Amino acid sequence: MPLPFESLIPFAVMSAMFTATGLGLYYVQYNRNEHKPPRYSVDDWDRKMMLRDKQLTGTRRGQVDKPIAPEEFKINSAWQNGSKSHLDITC
């Protein structure tokens, strides 16, 4: 039994929309991640290093190789400016 050609048009439209959506999502995530591959299995140490990188460079994925931190690093800590609301304090 042959396949009617009328069914190929909706199939092509649906396939094109799934492809466009997938490529759009990939493009947005790739650009948001600063053109670097995604991080998997992020543990507490990686989160602390990402926070440090954000404080040093201003971006989550930015990294510097300078051995001495800039002067702004002394005052942008959550402990020194009083914003400790993100810390998990349990008694």
Image (cartoon, rainbow, N blue to C red):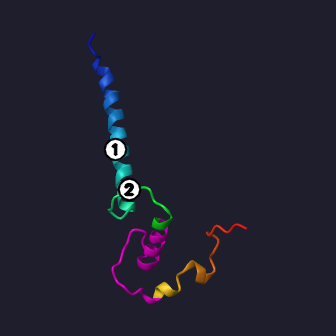
**Which residue extends farthest bottom?**
71
Measure the C-alpha gap from mark 2 to mark 1.
12 Å
- Amino acid type of disc 2? Val
Give residue 20's mark: 1
Instruction: Give the SS element for disc 1.
Output: helix
Whichever of labels 2 and 1 marks the residue nearer the N terminus, that label is 1
Mark 2 or 1, closer to the camera: 2
Cβ–Cβ under 8 Å for marks 2 and 1 = no
Tell me the quarter of the image containing the N terminus: top left
Image coordinates for residue 6, horizontal then vertical, percent: 31, 21
- Amino acid type of disc 1? Ala
Q: Residue at x 43, y 69 (%)?
A: 60
Q: From the image, tell me which residue sits under label 2.
A: 28
Position of 14 with respect to 81 (left or right) is left
Image coordinates for residue 49, horizontal then vertical, percent: 45, 71
Q: Which residues are magenta?
A: 47-71
Tell me the quarter of the image containing the C terminus: bottom right
Position of 77 with respect to 12 (left or right) is right
In the picture, residue 90 is in which quadrant? Answer: bottom right
Q: Residue at x 36, y 85 (%)?
A: 67
Image coordinates for residue 73, horizontal then vertical, percent: 47, 84
Image coordinates for residue 57, horizontal then vertical, percent: 41, 77
